[in-house]
């Protein structure tokens, strides 16, 4: 089963995400666990993208103002959640930050992303964030009673159309299971500490991600603004270290 590791922390965690993670990446590649990932540039270089009443709203920085921000990500393949937690616990950022372990939705194929970035292109991680509270309960209710359904509940076909529309600007992406399926991993005084749920209780949680390859930030913003979740949620765009 495949899991997304969201590496959270301050600048020290970001430094680990950019320096090969102290040999962790090489060890996990050797074990056949690591399937992809990368370190992200600081949150100040990111953009939060929303569309409200057909107006594009841009904010500098991340989608949520929390102490610990996403510093990097990894895609791993493990037999179960316990094995994924053990892989996360071995990551060097756990003493200074935390790692949110989230299973991907079923059917995820192997990420196939070229290592080399073509000249004149840049890569961005686009975090698709939405209000995911009470999703299961609302899915069971008749549609006329849904006062405020999650923005991603009724958009799978729209997402397929978005993927077709952005073309080769999108390298890869996949939705995640609900935040209730997450486990957050830290190290406190050398001991591994796990808590159920995402790293922060915010209204908008990460529902999936896409890896974009664009000529510049403007092109990436255009792709993000056309995503169907932008109309009810928020897209966080963060450039990768390359």
Image: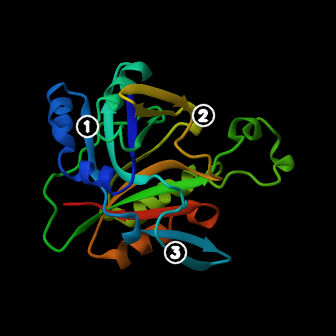
Q: Is residue 208 above or below residue 179?
A: below
**Quarter of the image where one finds residue 21:** top left
Q: Is residue 73 visible?
A: yes
For the residues labelled 3 and 2, the Cα–Cα distance comes to 28 Å
Identify which residue is drawn at 86% across, 47% down.
145
Disc 3 vs disc 1: which is toward the camera?
Answer: 3
Nearer-N-terminus badge (1/2): 1
Residue 106 spot, x, y in % from top left: 47, 32
Q: Residue furthest front?
A: 189
Residue 184 spot, x, y in % from top left: 48, 35
For the residues labelled 1 and 2, the Cα–Cα distance comes to 24 Å
Residue 35 is labelled as: 1
Q: Is label 2 in a helix, a strand or a loop?
A: helix
Identify which residue is drawn at 25% across, 37% down.
35
Nearer-N-terminus badge (3/1): 1
Lateral position of residue 147 relative to residue 107, left or right: right
Q: Quadrant of the C terminus?
A: bottom left
Label 3 crowding class (10 Å Cα cut-off): few <14, some 14-19, many 20+? few
Residue receiving disc 2: 180
Residue 59 is labelled as: 3
Residue 125 spot, x, y in % from top left: 36, 58
């Amino acid at each position: 089963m495949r899991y997304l590791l969201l590496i959270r922390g301050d600048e020290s965690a970001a430094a680990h995400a950019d320096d090969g993670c102290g040999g962790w990446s090489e060890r996990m590649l050797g074990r056949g666990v690591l399937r992809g990932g990368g370190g992200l540039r600081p949150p100040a270089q990111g953009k939060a993208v929303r569309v409200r009443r057909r107006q594009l709203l841009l904010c500098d920085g991340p989608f949520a103002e929390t102490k610990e921000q996403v510093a990097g990500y990894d895609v791993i393949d493990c037999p179960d959640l316990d094995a994924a937690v053990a892989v996360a616990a071995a990551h060097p950022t756990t003493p200074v930050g935390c790692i949110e372990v989230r299973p991907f939705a079923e059917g995820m194929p192997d990420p196939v992303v070229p290592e080399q970035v073509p000249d004149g292109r840049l890569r961005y991680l686009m975090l698709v964030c939405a209000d995911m509270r009470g999703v299961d309960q609302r899915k069971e209710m008749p549609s006329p009673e849904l006062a405020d359904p999650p923005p991603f509940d009724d958009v799978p076909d729209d997402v397929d159309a978005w993927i077709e529309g952005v073309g080769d600007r999108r390298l890869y992406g996949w939705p995640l299971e609900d935040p209730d399926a997450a486990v957050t991993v830290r190290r406190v005084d050398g001991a591994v500490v796990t808590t159920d749920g995402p790293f922060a209780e915010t209204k908008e949680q990460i529902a999936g991600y896409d890896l974009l390859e664009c000529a510049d930030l403007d092109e990436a913003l255009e792709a993000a603004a056309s995503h169907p979740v932008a109309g009810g949620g928020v897209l966080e765009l963060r450039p990768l270290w390359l």
